[in-house]
Image (cartoon, rainbow, N blue to C red):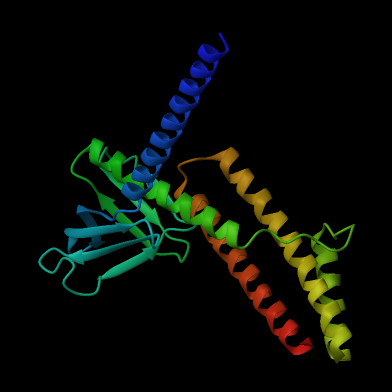
Amino acid sequence: MDEIYSRSISSICEQCYKAVNEANQFEAQELALQSQPIEGQLNKYTNVVKGWQYRWFVLNPNRGTLEYHMLEEKKKSHPRGCVYLAGCVISPSDEDSQTFTVSAACGEVYKLKAADAKERQFWVNKLRQVALNQENRIAAQHPPLHSSVANTVSTTGSMKSSTKSMKRQTIGGGTAGNSSSLETVRDILVQTQRYQRTLVNSIEDYTCNDEELLLMKATTYSAVMSLEQCFAILLSIQNSKLN
């Protein structure tokens, strides 16, 4: 009886191990497929004179970029244009079932047209997935700052007062003054993050297809992210001076 029970347990363990191993292999294959560049021909609206022109587009999931080439050149030369997809807004157009826009955080906008509705949905889904992955990666590398002050100022007037205080501390000079100034900058940045999240939530509650508001959402995201990176550089400089 014990021997039969032992064999049953062993068989179950083997099956579980096999199932887990197969699941891991499948996940690795999926990740490999997702990291492969996606290429294809799309119409790009160039200007009023030339109108729509065919271009060869390359979506690079690893770099998080969308670039395009002239058809006759394809990938033989540097791309004619390239945008980073982090903070990007990808919006299907109401004009028809083929057109969509890619609004980058830098302000550049690609107006594109696929061959049909199915192809448009394919590109929109892939672009949104790459943009989301890039944003998650950046968020993991640069987590939101946490205020070192229990009661962070919560009004624009208080923010101005904090800025004036920071200027006074900077004039005073010295290591202590610099440290205090950075603490004030941290508090202001934390508050800015809160304002930006409130703005994003309001935009998402209000609309999902207003291009100007969605562009504002992407631009504020990019701006706050840049401020966080600048603050990290300031901290690094201060630490190197202390050491």
Give percent across and percent down for residue 98.
25, 42
The residue sitting at the top extreme is 1
Please tell me which residue is depicted at 52% across the width and 57% down the height of the picture. 137
Q: Is residue 3 visible?
A: yes
- Image vertical order of residue 139 relative to residue 114, above or below: below
Check the picture and name the quadrant holding the C terminus: bottom right
Please tell me which residue is depicted at 41% across the width and 31% down the height of the picture. 18
Give percent across and percent down for residue 111.
30, 55
Give percent across and percent down for residue 156.
79, 62
- Image vertical order of residue 178 relative to residue 135, above or below: below
- Image vertical order of residue 240 relative to residue 227, above or below: below
Please tell me which residue is depicted at 34% across the width and 39% down the height of the picture. 94
Give percent across and percent down for residue 115.
18, 43
- Image vertical order of residue 95 relative to residue 182, above or below: above
Q: Looking at the rendering, which quadrant does residue 196 occupy?
A: bottom right
Q: Is residue 92 visible?
A: no
Q: Nearer the viewer, residue 3 or 19?
A: 3
Check the picture and name the quadrant holding the N terminus: top right
| In the image: residue 106, left or right of residue 235 | left
Q: How many marks?
A: 0
Q: Nearer the viewer, residue 53 or 197?
A: 197
Q: Looking at the rendering, which quadrant does residue 117 occupy?
A: top left
Q: Nearer the viewer, residue 209 or 230?
A: 230
Q: Looking at the rendering, which quadrant does residue 189 occupy?
A: bottom right
| In the image: residue 163, left or right of residue 37 | right
The residue sitting at the left extreme is 72
| In the image: residue 166, left or right of residue 239 | right
